[in-house]
Amino acid sequence: MSVNGTCFTIVAHNDGWFEFQAIPETLYRTTFGKARAGDTVNLEPCLGPADVFEGHIVQGHVDGMGSIHSVEPEGNSYIFTIDFDPSLSKYLVEKGSIAVNGISLTIVTAEHNSFTIAIIPYTWDHTNLSSLSEGDSVNIEVDVLAKYIEKLLPHFKS
């Protein structure tokens, strides 16, 4: 189960609830180290083998956290500017994909230590993005294909 974009194994469940375990790495790398009782989270089950794949590849393997710099209304949408660790900037490109709290999104602009995303009304109404404000932390997962290309590229240089 993906909880705010973090992949967890369900270790117990019953009607209306489930339990998972977080290890120190998860608490360090994700917003779960700062979580409070009552926080709203995004939930998404894993893609099953018979499910149709649509959208970006999102694994639930969080690369780091970002911080909401600003949320600005624009027409019927919202523009989020998110500050993040510049070491991840090499994986972000304009119109590329990124996951924020597990939500597969398209990058509007990509800078050295910040990026923007545009949130459509449906996403605003059906995720926890509408409950976030300046200074709040979010989980960030960069495009896994970019990470694989980076890893493989040195093997093809002559």
Image: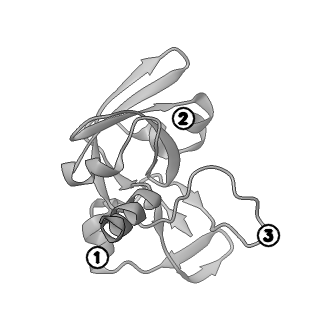
Residue 145's spot in the image, x, y percent?
A: 46, 59
- Residue at 34%, 71% (x, y): give it: 155
Residue 64's spot in the image, x, y percent?
A: 30, 59
User: Mark 2 or mark 3, which has the lower sequence index?
Assistant: 3
Question: In the rendered image of this protein, does residue 73 appear above or below residue 155?
Answer: above
Residue 107's spot in the image, x, y percent?
A: 43, 37
Q: Residue furthest top?
A: 75
Return the residue at label 3.
50
Return the residue at label 2.
124
Amino acid of disc 1: Glu
Q: In the image, is 32 to the left or to the right of 74?
A: left
- The foreground one among 110 and 79 is 110
Amino acid of disc 3: Ala
Q: What number is the disc on residue 25? A: 1
Single out the mark in the foreground, 2 or 1.
1
C-alpha distance separating marks 1 and 3: 32 Å
- Residue at 29%, 70% (x, y): give it: 27
